[in-house]
Amino acid sequence: MLAESRSFRRAAALLAAALTLAIGSACRRPGLVSPRAPIVLISVDTLRADHLPAYGYTGVETPSLDALRKDAVLFTNAYSHVPLTLPSHVSIFTGLLPPQNGVRDNLGYALGPGPVTIASLLKAHGYATGGAVSTIVLSGATGISRGFDFWDDDVEPTKANQSLSRVQRRGDVTEGLLSGWIASHAKVPFFAFLHLFEPHTPYEPPEPFRSRYKLAYDGEIARADQIVGHFLEFLKERGIYDRALVIFLSDHGEGLNDHGEDEHGVLLYREAIHVPLMVKFPGGRRAGETVRAPVALTDVLPTVAAVAGLPVPPQMAGTSLTSWLGEGDAKGPAVRRIYGETLYPRLHLGWSDLASLTDDRNQYIQSPRPELYDIVADPGENNDLAPGVPPAFRALSAALTAIPRPLQAPGSSDPEQVKKLAALGYISATTADLNRKDLPAPRDRIGAVEKLKQGFGALQAGRYPEAVTVFQQLLKAEPGMTDVWQLLAEALLKVGRDQEALAALETAARLAPGNPQVLMALSEYYLAIGNYAEARKHAELVSDTGPTSPHENLARIALAAGDLHAAEREARAALQRYPSRRIPHLILGRVARDRRDFALALTELDSAARPQEGEAGMSLQNLSYLRGDCLARLGRDAEAEEAFLREVRDFPANPSPRTALALLYASQGREDDARRSLSELVAQIPTPEALFAAIRTYEVLGDPRSAEELKAQARRMFPGAKEHKQES
């Protein structure tokens, strides 16, 4: 590891030197320096530049951003360095490219202690620093929060193994949290960072935007504009706006199927990396100006330093945006080439990674089938000029080849983590896989993503056999698709093919060592089959340097093993990291119930039922079920029935409330209702878990005949289910 570290430092130094030659040196404009001015950075996730009126788009109304544009300098050709949330924000905060800062993907990477960040730079010079984010991907545990006095990332999943893109909170809630922090620091120099997840998928704009816009993506943009407008109005009311440096940007764009990709991360075309950038200088200086030269998100840190009158840290990949605000023709360096990359196709799909350089005329994309586009004549990048090998192709190809781009493996920044993964056999092929040169070009395989979505749709709809078939067909053609192996495992578990599910998960873990979602899925698998030691071992592999904390899963494992003391300890550890989280209270409620302290259990469950601001209507799986169970044990049958029915309504695939209802009805002499509840369970949830839950309930109710009939049905439908082995 020491040799690798030295090699990486040398590569980073070479990269910095190469980019310094390409971009020129930072330039500080005396008229724009405002020491100790408030500094506000607003990032709207997944926002394409060409979907804003400020960039010529007519499909959406953004009055707040239009007003900001009048007060700001508009950069018409700003580029992200990577079309993924975490690595892009790390580049924004550090002024370093992904190969320099080491964060290459949303999963398995964390920012190390070395690089200076905007927050740490400003904090060292007397600024208060506060940030609030709307996605779990920007968890402070990834290192993104270094230098912040206040960092609110308390964004909670509502069920185990929830997709990271679904773990988000409403932007108005995030804005309110940051505004509250600013209100208490308005009299001192401060740096405030606001992150909104609108318009990231899923596109679910509220009214009136849902009805107003045919394209839901545009509806989410309009909602983001409303939130930004409310925030800017708050700054104006507090007398902050005029004297502040306000930077508005996005971390990356969105495919919207322009080149076959509907979201982002796989391809590097302009729709994914061309982002909006507006800079409002203190006092409104240079308001309304436009800069058309190529600029980059790594320019943000040098810009902040220049305006604050602070020294720029060494080896920055970016340069101050003030460099482009000279007089006449003396605006910025003569040559600017913006670096871009994505390792997502290699790490998640088994395809080649991509890298690119973009200048004022062309974009070159390096892959097994390189591409070149004239982005002035062909901004939609429909005409690939690479086959003709024009001079621009040769120049940009040579320049990109000269830039060192070490491909750090996920988890490689944590030596102890690497040892644990290697001990389980999950990391042996990583180096070889990262150095493979025979991988396909993503643009030639992008159609496979539609097949992935077809399988995912079947899985979400409960059509598990169909999902298994789709995923298996896809993996025959695309065996490197880590995410599909994990989804296949989930579908296989649902149809009782447990050993095949384990094999699929182990394949995913070997393909993507350190991927916290895969490791958590393995932990869930071992928990489901009762192998608590392996479940605990895999949960502990998920370090606290990522968006997923292991403590909640460790608490659930301890519960299943009957270790209530350990379950309580882990739940409280989770609360210490995220004080507002509800799931730890749910676990503590279960602990109290198992200790037969039903009053305390209800108190904890009440805490779990109390959503954070803006989460009205968001329930947690098993919350109403556990509440109903406690109420039933206290003899409060009517309230218990209501709670069980609520769980059925909110989580129809959960068998527990239906079996609980059957037992409750039977205790009241309502035999027909009890049988109806179990019949609906078997009919509506076609999984081994549901069938065997019904079987056990019939046995408890003293109906061995119905239990045996269901056992025969289970053997026909799910011959490989683990419950058969447990019975024998």
Image (tube, grey):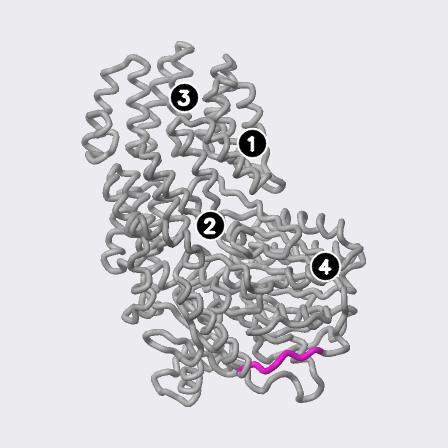
Depth order, front residue of 153/709: 153
- Labels 2 and 4: the sequence-earlier one: 4
Q: Could you tell me how far apart the alpha carbons at marks 2 and 3 are, in whole angstroms?
A: 31 Å
Q: Residues within 10 Å of mark 4 (few under 14, many from 20)?
A: many
Which residue, given by chain and number where applicable, does mark 3 sit on?
Answer: 660
Percent x, y for residue 288?
A: 71, 74
**Which amino acid type is shown beneath numbered disc 2?**
Leu
Q: How many marks?
A: 4
Instruction: In the displayed orientation, state which residue is furthest to the front.
Output: 2
Percent x, y for residue 449?
A: 35, 59
* 426, above or below 602, in the image: below
**Which amino acid type is shown beneath numbered disc 4?**
Tyr
Percent x, y for residue 121?
A: 65, 63
Which residue, given by chain and number where applicable, does mark 1 sit on?
Answer: 609
Which residue, given by chain and number where applicable, does mark 4 sit on?
Answer: 127
- Labels 2 and 3: the sequence-earlier one: 2
* Secondary element at tag 3: helix
* 27, above or below 47, in the image: below
- Labels 3 and 1: the sequence-earlier one: 1
Q: Determine if residue 212 is in view.
A: yes
Can you tell which quarter of the image residue 61 is in? bottom right
* Secondary element at tag 1: helix
For the point 77% across and 77% down, the residue is 31
Tell me, yes or no, whether the two marked residues, 4 and 1, touch with CB atoms within 8 Å.
Answer: no
Instruction: In the displayed orientation, state which residue is furthest to the top.
Output: 669
- Labels 4 and 1: the sequence-earlier one: 4
Q: Could you tell me how far apart the alpha carbons at marks 2 and 4 are, in whole angstroms?
A: 32 Å
Tell me, yes or no, whether the two marked residues, 2 and 1, touch with CB atoms within 8 Å.
Answer: no
- Give the extent of the magenta segment: 22-28
Tell me, yes or no, whether the two marked residues, 2 and 4, touch with CB atoms within 8 Å.
Answer: no
Q: Could you tell me how far apart the alpha carbons at marks 3 and 1 are, in whole angstroms?
A: 20 Å
Q: Residues within 10 Å of mark 2 (few under 14, many from 20)?
A: some
